[in-house]
Image: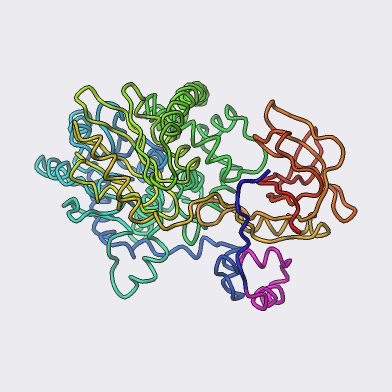
Amino acid sequence: MSSKAWKLPPIDESIVDSVVAQSKLLPPIARVLVLRGLHSDGQVNNFIHPRLSNLTDPYLLSNMEKAVVRIWKAIDEAEPMTVFGDYDVDGISSTALLTRVLLTLGAHVKPFIPSRLDEGYGLSQDALERCVEEHEPRVVVSVDCGVNSVASVAYAQSKGIDVIVTDHHEPQEQTANAFALINPKLTCPEPDRGRAMAELENLSGVGVAFKLAHALIKHGRAQKKDLAEKVDLRNYLDIVALGTVADIVPLVRENRILVRHGLAQLDRTKWIGLKALKEVAGMRGAAETYHLGFQLGPRINAAGRIGQPMQALQLLITEDAGEARRIAKLLDDTNAERRRIEAEMADQAFAEIDEYFDPKKHYGLVVAREGWHPGVVGIVASRVSRHYNRPAIIMGIESDGSARGSGRSIDEYNILHGLQACSEHLAKHGGHKMAVGLEVKPSALQVFRQDFNSAAASVLAGADLSPVQHIDAVVSADLLGRPLFDQLKDLRPFGQDNPEPVWALQGVRISGSPRVVGQKHLKFMLTSEGRTFDAIAFNYSIDRLPEGKIDVAFTLKENNWNGNTSLQLQVQDIRPAAE
C-alpha cells in the first residue's frame, strides 16, 4: 500500500478550458501547462515548439565581447590556449564543446581536466600549476568553474596568462579577478538585464560555454573569417544537452530549447565517441532525457569519479573510431565498478542513519567514514536525500582528520545557505542550492554535523516533509490512448522544473494474476471502464498490492517489445480506492 499523501493541485478550470479552446489540446495536457504557469496562446506555443531562433543574444552576458575579442586575437596570432574544465559531465561536455569549436576556428588549443583525487574540484591552484607546466598557455578559458577561484586566477595572471572564466555557479562575495568573467548569475548590461537574467540564470556550465561559442561565431562571421562560416553550432547541441541534463538544471526557457534540439541531434550525432557510447550503453529508440541522465551521463561521470576524466573527454573529441570503441568500453566497465562501490557505501550510510534518525530532530544529515571513495559521495548523497527527504552530506574522512565530500538537497532547502551558516568549520565549499561540494577542517566534523542540522532545522522544522505523490490530473480510461501520448511528447524534454506528468486512474481493478519480472518488478493488467491496460511497477513487491479496487498513479510510456509497440502505465504509486 502507499505511504504517500496524494496531492492534486487546485486549478482554475476556466483557464484550462480557455487553453483547450485556443490550442486544441486535450484537457489533461492543458491542465499540465496551466499548472506550469503557461496560460496564453503564445506561451503555450513557445513551450510546445521551442525554437533555436528564440535563443538570446550571447552578448547579453557581461564581459562577453571582451572575452571574444581576446580569444580571436589568440587565434589570429597562434597563441597557445587551454580550455580548463571540471571532471563531472557538465565540465567534460563544456570542455569538449569549446575545444572542438576552437579547433574548427583554427585555434592552437589543448583541453585540460584536473584530477579529482589529487587536485580537487574546479580551478584549483594545484591543477592550474600543472596545466601551465604541461601546456604553457597564453590564454586559459575555464568552463564550468572558476568564478570564485581568486588565488588561482591571480597566480595565472602573475605568470602573464590571461584567464577567461565561464561559469554558472553561485558567485561569492569576492569573485576571481579574471581578464573576463562570464557568469549569468552576475549582472548583465542594461537595458536588457531583466530579460537576460530570466532566460540565462539557470544555464549549466556547458550552456554558458555554448553562449561563448555562439558569440565567437558571430564575431568571426562579422569579421568575414572563412572558418567561422563553416561552423554549424547545431551539430554541437547533443554535447550541450548531455551536460545540461546531467547537471540537473531547470529544463525551462533557454535550457529547454537547447535540450529539445540537442536530443534530436543526438539521434543523428556526427561524433563517433557519442555513437560508441550509445552502443555500449545499449541505447535504443529516439533519445530522451532518461538516456542522458541514466545511461550516457553516468558513464561519462564514472571516469571523473573513480577513473581518468581525460579519457571521457577524449571520447567526446576523438575522430578515431577504434579509440572511441575502446574508451566507451572502458567507461562502461568503470561505471559498473562505480555502481558496486556506490551500493556498498549507500548500505553503510542507510544503516548508520537508521540507528538514530528521528524525523522531528534530524533535518540535515551528515555521514562520514574513513575509506569512502570521494568520487562516489555525491551519488550516495542523492540517494540518502531522496530516501529521507532531507538535505544530506556524505564525506570521506582523510588521514589528517579533515573530511571531503558532497551534499544534495530537497526543493524546500537551499543547501548552499546551510554551508554558509557553518562556514567557520569549512576549509572550502561551493555549489548551488541543490548540490554542493565541501571540505571540513580537521577535528571539526562533529561540530559541523551539529551546526548543519541546526541550520537545516531553522528552515525545515515547520515544514511537512512526509512523502508526497504529486498528481497532475485524474484521467478517465477513455482518454488513455495515442492522441494523449502524442500530445504528451510535445511537453518533452522532461527533467528539473519540468517533470514528466503523473496521471491517476481511480477505482480500477487488477485483471488476472500479477507476475514478478526481473526479480523485483511487478507486471499486471488493469481494467477500467471496459478497457484493459498493461502496467508495470518497479521495485514493488506483490504483497504490497491492496485488495479490491485501487487508485493508480502512473506515467504513460511507450513499450517496444519484439517489434510490437504499445502504451504502458509505469506505476508510481498504488493505494486503496478512495471512497
Q: Residue furthest left?
A: 158
Left or right position of 514 against 122 = right
* Residue 303 visible in rendering: yes
* Residue 108 visible in rendering: no
Which residue is nearer to you in this view: 287 or 271?
287
| Quadrant in which the N terminus appears | top right
Height in image: 369 above or below 406?
Answer: above
Residue 28 painted magenta: yes
Numbered circles on residues, count = 0
Which residue is nearer to you in this view: 291 or 1?
1
| Quadrant in which the C terminus appears | bottom right
Stretch in magenta: 12-33
Q: Quadrant of residue 307?
A: top left
Q: Position of residue 46 (x, y in %)?
A: 57, 67
Residue 304 painted magenta: no
Residue pictured at 60% horizontal, 63% vertical: 49
How has the structure been colored for display? rainbow
Which residue is nearer to you in this view: 352 or 530?
352
Magenta span: chief secondary structure: helix
Left or right position of 270 against 116 = right
Q: Quadrant of residue 501?
A: bottom right
Q: Position of residue 97 (x, y in %)?
A: 41, 43
Height in image: 109 above or below 553?
Answer: above
Q: Position of residue 519 (x, y in %)?
A: 69, 25
Which residue is nearer to you in this view: 91 or 405?
405
Q: Position of residue 244 (x, y in %)?
A: 46, 48
